[in-house]
Amino acid sequence: MKILFATKLHLISCFTNISISKNIFITVFYIFLCHEFLMKMELFESKNALDQVLQRYRVDSVSIGFVPTMGALHPGHISLVERCCKENGITVVSIFVNPTQFNDKNDLANYPRTLEEDIHQLGLAGCDFVFAPPVKEMYPEEDTRVFDFGMLDKVMEGECRPGHFNGVAQIVSRLFDVVRPDKAYFGEKDFQQLAVIRRLVAMTNQSVQIIGCPIVREADGLAMSSRNVLLTPEQRKKVPVIARTLFACKEKIGSMPLDELKKWVVTQIDSIPGLQTGYFDIVDRNTLQTAVHYQENALQGCIAVRVGTIRLIDNISL
């Protein structure tokens, strides 16, 4: 591959000597680079095939980093992949829309699926292996396991979406069994999910290190989400109020009772036509239980907002 790449560079060098324009040169060079990255990356649909390849790296003690996703990748996902690439010898990314974590069949049906574009982005980000299995590969038979996370999955998202986190635990545990990563990377936008996965790893005595990565936001503050592409232009103009209100909440924390602050946040969101707060809570960062009093550097504000048929979540450290 290195010889092939050197040959490409030699060809480009030759092109520059025949008065090729700078813009064309840059375009050709970019295409060659894209091709080189994509040639490096491998796509797997079979658990056994991926395991056989990864076993070669395990034997040589090469660190394996893992980023599980449901696809429809955005810059937030890519930031996880890039960090994973920097911190590990090999990077594996899964793309799998997990049916067991959806309690709304319409939500599952409407979830964006952009596999071809996702693969292209992952190649450019430096990913080594993509695992994109069919449903039958991950669930050859029904998964009847029920996980007990105490109160972690009974509040906020867990209360609004019964069974959601049990489905997340089912698929993440299966993916961990396949990849057996040294480190796994998750975005902090799904703050409650991150807490549940950390508990899952502790419960199952897995050696994987869970790395939480900061929320990536659009220029107007909106937390990046695969569901953002489902917003209409009019809805998209309105939703930055979610982040603005959370930022304002952070400024106000400690200046009024928490109950009053929570009411203020809900009022701000719900005053925008078309937006409806599902919940907003200020919780202990570790237990996710509702906080009664302000504790510096110990609380998290977590929110879910319905925008038409679309549901957006966000959170902020308080």
Image (spheres, grey):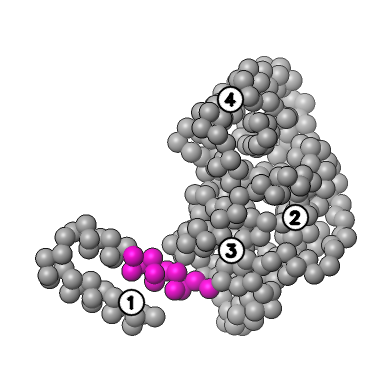
- Magenta stretch containing residue 34, yes or no? yes
Question: Residue 240 versus residue 136: which sits nearer the camera?
Answer: 136
- Read off the residue under disc 2: 99
User: Disc 1 or 3, which lies upstream in sequence?
Assistant: 1
- Read off the residue under disc 4: 245
Placement of 165 over or under 246, stated as above or below: below
- Magenta stretch containing residue 106, yes or no? no
User: Disc 2 or 1, which lies upstream in sequence?
Assistant: 1
- Read off the residue under disc 3: 93
- Read off the residue under disc 1: 5
User: Disc 3 or 2, which lies upstream in sequence?
Assistant: 3
Q: Main secondary structure of the magenta part?
A: helix
Q: Nearer the viewer, mark 1 or mark 4?
A: 1
C-alpha distance separating marks 3 and 2 = 18 Å
Determine contact: label 2, label 1, CB under 8 Å.
no
Determine contact: label 4, label 3, CB under 8 Å.
no
Placement of 259 over or under 307, stated as above or below: above
Question: Residue 147 versus residue 259: which sits nearer the camera?
Answer: 147
Question: Residue 234 versus residue 133: which sits nearer the camera?
Answer: 234
Local packing at callout 3 (Cα closer than 10 Å; few below 14, some 14-19, many 20+) is: many
Q: Is residue 1 visible?
A: yes
